[in-house]
Image: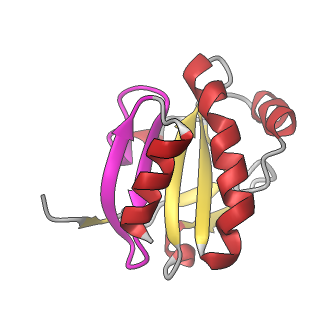
Amino acid sequence: EEPVTAPDTAFYDDSGNERRLSAFRGRYVAVNFWATWCAPCREEMPAFVDLFHERQEEGLMIVGVNAQETASQAAAFVDDFGITFPVVLDIRGEVQQLYSVRGLPTTVFIDRAGRVVERWPGLLDRRALEESLAEIQ
């Protein structure tokens, strides 16, 4: 399957600031869709936090997309896990629709040229996450 260009989504962070996916061109990106009530999301989040911390200097960008919860719910999750990558609120589920997200967690891997290379529905352990990141690096 030929990679397709990722939709240039406008994200809004928890302060209401717009961020665009195209701003991350030249970096390799994992867009991780999650919710606070999702046990597998909680299970996989430490690996995302650790890998972002280890690899952001070499070009890794992770964008966390909170699925249809309030800013305060999302903020508590961010604090619990010490998330330092951008987290955006998808209050109406529009970003999930754009990326054909059917369940949580789902992670979409985008290469440095802005193409969707892989969509991973379900839990990612650290090894699987590292393998997927290696394909888009």
Q: Is residue 95 above or below residue 29?
A: above
Farthest front residue in view: 127
The residue shown at (36%, 48%) is 98
Q: Is residue 124 above or below residue 103?
A: below
**Which is nearer the eye, 53 or 8?**
53
From the viewer's perspective, is 99 left or right of 31?
left
Does residue 108 belong to the magenta stretch? yes
Residue 64 in the image: x percent, y percent? 62, 47
Residue 85 in the image: x percent, y percent? 72, 57
Q: Quadrant of the C terminus?
A: bottom left
Farthest left residue in view: 1
From the viewer's perspective, is 63 left or right of 7?
right
The residue shown at (30%, 60%) is 117
From the viewer's perspective, is 84 left or right of 96?
right
Q: Quadrant of the N terminus?
A: bottom left
The residue stretch that appears in magenta = 97-122
The residue shown at (35%, 29%) is 102
**Which is nearer the eye, 92 or 115?**
115
The residue shown at (71%, 63%) is 54
Q: Is residue 110 visible?
A: yes
Residue 105 in the image: x percent, y percent? 49, 31
**Which is nearer the eye, 81 or 103?**
81
Q: Is residue 35 visible?
A: no
Residue 78 in the image: x percent, y percent? 79, 39
